[in-house]
Amino acid sequence: LFTYSFQYHLLHFTSNKWFFFSFANRQKRRFAPLNISRGPNDFPATLKMFLQLLFVAAALAASGTGQRITTIQLDGVQYFISRMNPYSPELNYFLAYQYCRSIGLQLASFETKEKSDSIMQYLINAGYNKYDFWTSGNRLGTDMLIWMSTGLPFNATFDYMKKNPGEEMPVARQLGAVEQRKDSGASSGCVLLRAPDLQWDINDCTDIKDFICEQTRCYYYNYGSIPVSSAQG
């Protein structure tokens, strides 16, 4: 028997099953029980399931109950550094992207060297250069590096990524980089700042890392909308 309470959320384990309850906004939601098979690896499986559910509870609490988070501001941009926030978990690239969205932010993009240098210098001065940090950069399903949060390709002047042995230029400037690199698997294409010197590098997207979110950008669309009804075709 195990029960864990997180603000308005409740995790309950009994009879080899997990139950997740939510009381946010005065609404009670009960999710279906999750079965965990018994066996020699029963405890690791149980622990893994608990951590996954704990992440879900934390994300819902942050977005649904107004949990306070700590951000910093550099050059007019607000950043959320997961390492600064004690309740923020280390996540793989995809969950980090979703976590940023759940708190009203987006996984950070660094289109210019000035913006990159600014965050790198802060992380070093704050003593966070012992950790790897996900950014929104990736090359998944494409032959170039792009910023996931903006959809923009890496600038041609983005020449400060880590060089592999034998490479004459950084990977960001290589044409057809996916085919040329040996680590071009479907999951080996996400960009991070790698400890201890915070070099830009490409890594397996499923690895668990810290991450950096930034404020969501607001765009002004200069077009008009035509009011319609569902009956119109």
Image (cartoon, rainbow, N blue to C red):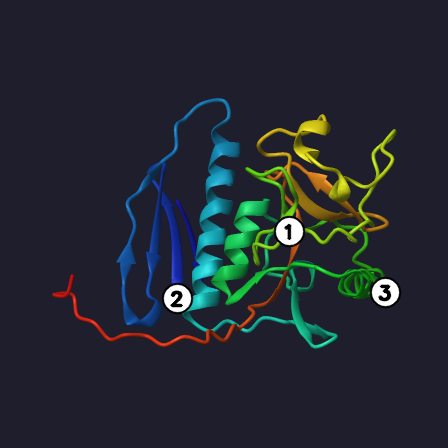
Which structural element holds mark 1?
Answer: loop
Most extreme residue toward the left, as rendered?
231
Amino acid type for the residue under numbered disc 1: Pro
Task: Assess whether mark 1 and mark 3 are in contact (beta carbons under 8 angstroms).
Answer: no
Q: CA distance from mark 1 to mark 2?
A: 41 Å
Amino acid type for the residue under numbered disc 3: Asn
Q: Nearer the viewer, residue 186 or 23?
A: 186
Which structural element holds mark 3?
Answer: helix
Judge from the rendering whether residue 167 lies leftward or rightward of residue 204; answer left or right: right
Residue 11 horizontal/vertical position (percent): 40, 52
Q: Quarter-wise, where is residue 7 in the image?
A: bottom left
Judge from the rendering whether residue 149 lies leftward or rightward of residue 26; answer left or right: right
Q: Earlier in the sequence, mark 1 or mark 2?
A: 2
Q: Quarter-wise, where is residue 21 in the image?
A: bottom left
Residue 16 horizontal/vertical position (percent): 36, 36
Badge number at residue 153? 1
Q: Nearer the viewer, residue 203 or 128?
A: 203
Name the mark nearer the viewer: 2 or 3. 3
Judge from the rendering whether residue 151 lies leftward or rightward of residue 179; answer left or right: left
Q: CA distance from mark 2 to mark 3?
A: 37 Å
Badge number at residue 8? 2
Which structural element holds mark 2?
Answer: loop
The residue beneath circle 3 is 125
Tell me which residue sits at (58%, 39%) in the image: 142
Q: CA distance from mark 3 to mark 1?
A: 29 Å
* Residue 58 vertical position relative to residue 201 in the rendered view, above or below: below
